[in-house]
Every structure is written in C-alpha cells, then in structure tokens.
Image (cartoon, rainbow, N blue to C red):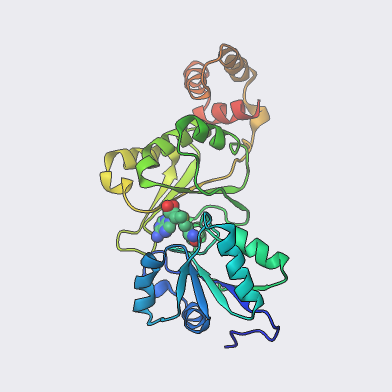
Amino acid sequence: MTVRVSSAAGVLYIVPTPIGNLADMVPRAIEVLQTVDLIAAEDTRHSGKLMQHFQISTPMISYHDFSSEQKAQDLLDRLKAGKNIALISDAGTPLISDPGYRLVSAAREEGINVIPIPGACAAIAALSASGLPSDRFAFEGFPPAKNSARRAFYQALVQDSRTLIFYESPHRIQASLADLLEVFGPERRMVMAREISKTFETFLSGTISSVLAIVEQDPDQQKGEIVLLVAGYQPPEQQEELSPEACRVMSLLLDEKLPVKQAASLAAAITGEKKNRLYDWALTR
Ligand code: SAM
C-alpha cells in the first residue's frame, strides 16, 4: 500500500477507529497510523490505549474543534512541508458528530490531498441492520439537550420521508423517546440500536410507543451508546378515503387546540376510524 502521494505536500488521512469491538479496526487504518508522521487525536490519552493495542508508536498531538487557529495552522504547515498526518477521534469516523470539519475544510482549501479510510461509523452500522428503508436517509446528529428545543428539532422533521438517524445520550434517552412519541405519534416505526459491536448489543424494533415502553421498564436499556432511527413519513395510502365524518370531527377537535394525539384518540372513539390514520391525516392538514 502506498501511503505517501507523489506531490510535495503531505496527505491528511481521515482514519476511523472501533466503536466497540477492537477487531473492528480495519487493517488499512492500522497501516496508515503506523506509517504517517503524526497522528492528530481528539484525546491523546484515550487513543493511547488503542495505539498500544495495535503497536503504533507514531507521535500524537491533540486536535479537536476547540483547538486554537494556531494549532490548525500548525497542522496545515506540517502538511504543506510534506508531512503525512492522520486524524482520529475517540471512536468511529472523525467528523461524524466528532471533530475535524475545520481542519479538513482548510486542508482542501490549501489544495492538500485528503484521503478517507472507510471504517466503523455507528450511524451507518445501525442503519444497515435496522430493517428500516436505507435507500434515502438523513443523519441528524445529536438532538438538542433541552426538551423544548428537542421537540422543535423533531417537529421540523416530522414530514421528512427519509429514514432519520440520531445519536442520543443514555441520560436523555427516556425524555427523547417521549418527545419522539409526542411529535411523530405512537405508531411511527423506529429502531433503537444500542452498544453496537459490544457485548450487550441490542436492537429494539417496533413502534415508538412499544420501544419507549421497553426502555421505561428496563433500566439496562437506558445505558450505553445509542443510535435512534425513525422511519420516514409516509402519506396515508388512502388519505382521501378517510370518511368526511372523521375529517369533520378531527378538524373540530384540532380547531379547539387539542394536541394531535388526544384529538386522534377522541376522534377514533367517536368515529371508529383508526387512530394512526387520524394522526397522520392531522399532520398533513
Ligand atoms: N464518530 C462516531 C461515529 O462514527 O459513529 C460518533 C461519535 S459521537 C461523539 C458518539 C455517539 O455515537 C454516541 O453517543 C452514540 O450515540 C453513537 N455511538 C458511538 N458508538 C456507538 C455504539 N457502539 N453503539 C451505538 N451507538 C454508538
């Protein structure tokens, strides 16, 4: 494998590291880390263990999104002087909810060759095994931590027809699932992928309400690293066939400012129409 390119400037390699199982480290990533002049790591202490495991003795310096302009400039100067540098984060693919964007963007502007090494990424691993449509998807990173901001963030995606992918912290998982239920409705399909490639890897698949019920009952589901995937919006197949009576009752209840979920429940009880059809109808009204 050729690590160095033939131009005078060095190469900036974007190198993924394992998200759980150390054996997820791809051989090409090991080779690049062993042969570059310098590794720019999100946290040098954290990555030290990985380097030890793979017998990588390349010098490391810390680089993250809060690093000074001077530090980024120093890396660019070294690249321009012909040094090869590998960028790594604590786990997975750098730049994916991880540091590196500023550096890569600046490197490209300077005409420096940037080479990605494909490898572990929690979002892609989760999607590939989720069973949700994978032809079109949107990676949305971490939702905001505060409830109202998180709800608004979800609300903006409610009619997106792509599979939606989020990272979420275990401390917020219950609140975040409750917000998903409130905004997307109880019947929307979802998958919660936890601890991928680790001992307690778990995929919970079902409606939002069924996944929330499991997580509420089982404290173990509130631990570890989590990817949430929500099926994209699908217009109700026979929306026009919703009876005029069901539409009228729903309109009345929504005009009275009832929350969509409550309006759908009441209208279902009154008209005999399915709750999720009424819910979906309300979203497109
Ligand atoms: N750059 C990483 C990647 O390529 O996936 C993501 C870094 S981001 C700071 C960390 C978040 O990714 C975690 O909070 C979790 O949402 C998700 N994540 C990372 N590893 C995971 C795993 N093994 N299982 C499930 N989710 C994971």
Quadrant for the N terminus in the image = bottom right
- Please state the horizontal and vertical placement of residue 269, each as a whole percent of the image: 47, 18
134 vs 56, nearest the viewer:
56
Q: Residue at x 63, y 41 (%)?
A: 160
Left or right: 181 with respect to 195?
right
Left or right: 213 with respect to 159?
left
Name the quadrant containing residue 43: bottom left
Which quarter is ligand 1 in? bottom left
Q: Residue at x 44, y 74 (%)?
A: 25
Quadrant for the C terminus in the image = top right
- Please count the marks in the image: 0
131 vs 244, nearest the viewer:
131
Q: Is residue 186 visible?
A: no
Left or right: 15 with respect to 11?
left
- Please state the horizontal and vertical placement of residue 264, each as a whole percent of the image: 51, 23
Left or right: 138 with respect to 55?
right
Q: Residue at x 47, y 45 (%)?
A: 190
- Please state the horizontal and vertical placement of residue 248, each as a whole percent of the image: 62, 15
- Please state the horizontal and vertical placement of residue 38, each as a whole percent of the image: 51, 76
In the rendered view, would you say 154 is above or below 275? Answer: below
Query: Most extreme residue toward the front, as rendered?
Result: 70
231 vs 113, nearest the viewer:
113
In the rendered view, would you say 186 is above or below 18? Answer: above
Q: Is residue 270 visible?
A: yes
